[in-house]
Amino acid sequence: MDLQLRGKTALVTGASRGIGLAAVRALVDEGVRVVAAARHVEGELASLPVEAVAG
């Protein structure tokens, strides 16, 4: 699905699992630059092409 978000930036909190991680994956697939905030930056989040921030 093309949401016309390519080139935009999104901030996702709670990004290390569940709905937050699913949102990160969907946004990355749409070509969005993602800043992902989570308590622990590890696992699948660390392997995605995002700027991960522990917070």
Image (cartoon, rainbow, N blue to C red):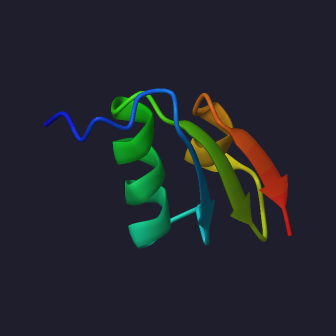
Query: In x, y percent, where is residue 13?
Result: 63, 69
Question: Looking at the figure, which quarter contains the N terminus?
Answer: top left
Judging depth in this view, the residue of 24 and 18 nearest the camera is 24
> Relative to 30, is 37 above or below?
below
* Residue drawn where x is 65% and y is 36% of the image: 50
Judging depth in this view, the residue of 53 and 8 nearest the camera is 8
Count the numbered circles shown. Answer: 0
* Residue drawn where x is 72% and y is 66% of the image: 38
Query: In x, y percent, where is residue 54?
Result: 85, 61
> Relative to 27, is 41 above or below?
below
Query: In x, y percent, where is residue 44?
Result: 56, 44
Position of 22 with respect to 9 (left or right) is: left
Judging depth in this view, the residue of 45 and 1 nearest the camera is 1
Residue 15 occupies quadrant: bottom right
Residue 27 occupies quadrant: top left
> Relative to 25, is 16 above or below?
below
* Residue drawn where x is 47% and y is 58% of the image: 21
Judging depth in this view, the residue of 36 and 32 nearest the camera is 32
Position of 27 with respect to 41 (left or right) is: left
> Relative to 26, is 48 above or below?
above
Query: In x, y percent, where is residue 14?
Result: 61, 72
* Residue drawn where x is 38% and y is 38% of the image: 5
Position of 25 with respect to 53 (left or right) is: left
Question: Looking at the figure, which quarter contains the C terminus?
Answer: bottom right
